[in-house]
Image (cartoon, rainbow, N blue to C red):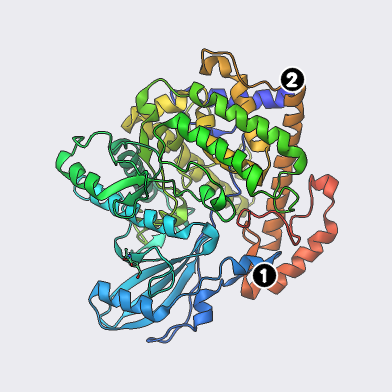
């Protein structure tokens, strides 16, 4: 098993060989791609409404889904009441129209409920109501609006042709005390369909347009503007005490515009959910703005150490870390504090604070329903933050292909077709064709981006680029998710320390500990694969939810599989039980 893990590490090293291919071709054995926190896609459910209608209040406030376990609690944290009349009034005012004629529930994402409002003039607008399970919804909303407005203002007159934009904010309020009784954002309706609906089928120029748009957004955000510190954006009047100016130097290009923006916006505490989710919001921590990368990493580790001492109930079945994990968690977090100043890349451009979209998934990219799929709008900027370039420059989620059905060659050549492709049944051929497309797109992106942005090749060529990409997330989830991911990352860093820093290695896992870790990590990976298969068989989302009308059937299937589940074979407990760990509840 050491051999297997060494092999995978080697694959990772090889993946970098052709000048700067990113770590996401494959992850080191003990660094797993962070799959659990994927946000739920906005499930669009058409509602058949008569014009001039509004669903009854409870329908507007309640989740259209049910959960296979902890249903009552899952629904309660998504219950989001508000005053619909007040929302209508604000929307009408912002559009200069007289009357709202209909509401349609567009869908529910992980943290927001989204409605489409139509008006007598024919105008349309989108209303986003955040759900309390995001945590610190007021701060997140204020920052999300400021981020969307900033991106539009900063690049409106300086954008490349195909750079997608956030939709325009028409009205908003981040408090629960306004007449609508909830934080809300009213947005211009952005026409188009989520890219997820076209991604498997499009080819050639239609798909090339997607890569082009994403690359333009990516380069504008990551290379177009650096900031004075790490944190999240706020309007100056909302920015809390201790906020930082926007830019280190107001005279940066374009000077006139940047002076104006520097007066209007500031950098405040991070709006990243991990720092404000329910429970953790009560931890007294330094949430930024942080002047530099080591301060940010150190603050994250101290935040978790403080959480251990104050808010975390290690006896709760929802917390994956057990009381026996406490010494390991402390050891890991203290290691993070020690390595923070030692893993900073020497090129200052690699640590310059930059803004990115927090979650560039296929569902957040809106494209025309047919033709070339240039992305016109990028939605859902909730939790966007400014952080060092080398921690923000991974391959966007929409592009990452990690299923491995079709391998991406490490030498940069085209992904091969399986040798037995011609003899496969037609359905299997069709599925392989889709995987092949995804693999080609990932390859095309990582080959093209460094041509536009040579700094990307430098970042991807760092021996610890994967560590930099995942570190903040793994630290802030290490109690809730269990210490294994962070331990994997630290072992990975230890194994290549001599090429990272010219300083004695502060990470001291023994050979035995590393072997034990590899075994545990392998079991955990297998368990997760089994759970994913179970979810697919039951037909639920990765948070264990199903649409109300499918609940009874899904529950029946779940009970059937519960009877078949063998904890030893499956490498862990049947995942659906009351009190089970849930990304959303802890
Ligand atoms: C939000 O509502 C509160 C209370 O009505 C008000 O004081 C505040 O100015 C509003 N904020 C914005 C951005 O409109």
The answer to whether 522 is drawn above or below residue 90 in the figure is: above
* Local secondary structure at mark 2: helix
Q: Tell me the distance, in whole angstroms, between the alpha carbons under discs 2 and 1.
A: 46 Å
Whether 305 is drawn above or below 505: the answer is below
The residue depicted at 56 percent of the width and 41 percent of the height is: 303
Nearer the observer, 308 or 155: 308
Q: Position of residue 130 (x, y in %)?
A: 47, 64
Q: Position of residue 71 (x, y in %)?
A: 67, 68
Residue holding disc 2: 511
Residue that numbered label 1 is attached to = 72
Q: Residue at x 21, y 35 (%)?
A: 252
> In the figure, is residue 351 to the left or right of 559?
left
Which residue corresponds to the image point at 56% horizontal and 52% vertical from the top-left? Answer: 282
Toward the viewer: 166 or 425?
Answer: 166
Q: Position of residue 17 (x, y in %)?
A: 49, 21
Q: Tell me the tag on residue 415.
A: none
Quadrant in the picture for the N terminus: top right
x 52%, y 32%: residue: 298
Eyeballing the image, is 328 above or below 421?
above
Quarter location, residue 133: bottom right
Tell which of 281 and 469 is nearer to you: 281
Residue 112 visible in the current orientation: yes
- Mark 1: secondary structure: helix
Q: Is residue 169 above or below residue 532?
A: below
Taking the view exactly as shown, the residue that stands out farthest to the left is: 256
- Residues marked 2 and 1 touching at CB (< 8 Å): no
Image spot of residue 562 (x, y percent): 81, 60
Which is more foreground, mark 2 or mark 1? 1
Disc 1 crowd, CA 10 A, few/some/many (<14, 14-19, 20+): few
């Amino acid at each position: 098993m050491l051999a297997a893990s060494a092999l995978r590490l080697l694959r990772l090293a090889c993946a970098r060989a052709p000048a700067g291919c990113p770590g996401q071709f494959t992850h080191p054995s003990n660094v797993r791609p962070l799959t659990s926190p994927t946000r739920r896609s906005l499930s669009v459910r058409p509602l058949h409404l008569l014009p001039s209608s509004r669903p009854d209040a409870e329908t507007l406030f309640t989740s259209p889904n049910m959960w296979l376990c902890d249903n009552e609690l899952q629904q309660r944290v998504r219950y989001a009441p508000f005053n619909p009349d007040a929302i209508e009034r604000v929307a009408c005012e912002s559009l200069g129209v007289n009357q709202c004629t209909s509401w349609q529930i567009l869908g529910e994402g992980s943290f927001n409920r989204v409605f489409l409002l139509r008006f007598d003039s024919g105008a349309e607008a989108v209303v986003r109501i955040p759900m309390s399970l995001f945590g610190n919804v007021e701060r997140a909303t204020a920052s999300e609006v400021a981020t969307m407005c900033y991106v539009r203002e900063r690049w409106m007159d300086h954008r490349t042709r195909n750079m997608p934009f956030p939709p325009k904010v028409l009205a908003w309020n981040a408090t629960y005390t306004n007449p609508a009784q909830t934080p809300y954002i009213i947005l211009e309706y952005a026409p188009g369909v989520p890219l997820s609906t076209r991604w498997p089928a499009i080819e050639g120029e239609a798909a090339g347009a997607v890569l082009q748009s994403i690359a333009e957004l990516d380069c504008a955000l990551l290379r177009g503007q650096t900031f004075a510190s790490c944190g999240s954006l706020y309007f100056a009047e909302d920015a809390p005490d201790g906020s930082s100016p926007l830019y280190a130097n107001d005279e940066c290009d374009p000077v006139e515009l940047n002076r104006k923006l520097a007066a209007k916006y500031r950098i405040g505490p991070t709006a990243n959910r991990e720092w404000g989710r329910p429970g953790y919001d009560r931890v007294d921590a330094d949430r930024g703005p942080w002047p530099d990368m080591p301060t940010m990493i150190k603050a994250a580790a101290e935040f978790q150490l403080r959480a251990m001492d104050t808010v975390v109930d290690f006896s709760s079945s929802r917390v994956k870390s057990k009381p026996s994990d406490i010494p390991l968690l402390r050891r890991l977090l203290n290691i993070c504090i020690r390595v923070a100043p030692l893993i900073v890349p020497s090129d200052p451009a690699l640590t310059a604070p930059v803004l990115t979209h927090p979650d560039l998934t296929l569902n957040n990219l809106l494209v025309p329903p047919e033709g070339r799929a240039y992305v016109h709008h990028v939605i859902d900027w909730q939790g966007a933050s400014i952080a060092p370039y080398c921690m923000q420059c991974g391959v966007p989620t929409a592009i990452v292909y990690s299923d491995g059905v079709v391998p991406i060659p490490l030498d940069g050549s085209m992904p091969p077709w399986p040798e037995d492709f011609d003899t496969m049944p037609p359905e299997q051929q069709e599925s392989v064709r889709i995987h092949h497309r995804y693999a080609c797109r990932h390859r095309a992106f990582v080959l093209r981006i460094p041509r536009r942005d040579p700094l990307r090749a430098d970042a991807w060529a760092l021996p610890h680029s994967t560590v930099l990409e995942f570190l903040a997330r793994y630290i802030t989830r290490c109690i809730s998710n269990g210490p294994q991911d962070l331990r994997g990352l630290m072992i990975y860093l230890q194994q290549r320390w001599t090429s990272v820093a010219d300083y004695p290695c502060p990470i001291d896992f023994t050979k035995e500990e590393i072997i034990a870790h590899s075994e545990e990590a392998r079991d955990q990976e297998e368990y997760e694969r089994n759970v994913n298969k179970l979810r697919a068989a039951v037909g639920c989302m990765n948070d264990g939810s199903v649409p109300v009308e499918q609940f009874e059937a899904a529950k029946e299937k779940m009970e059937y599989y519960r009877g078949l589940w063998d904890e030893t074979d499956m490498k862990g407990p049947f995942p659906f039980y009351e009190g089970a760990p849930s990304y959303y509840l802890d």
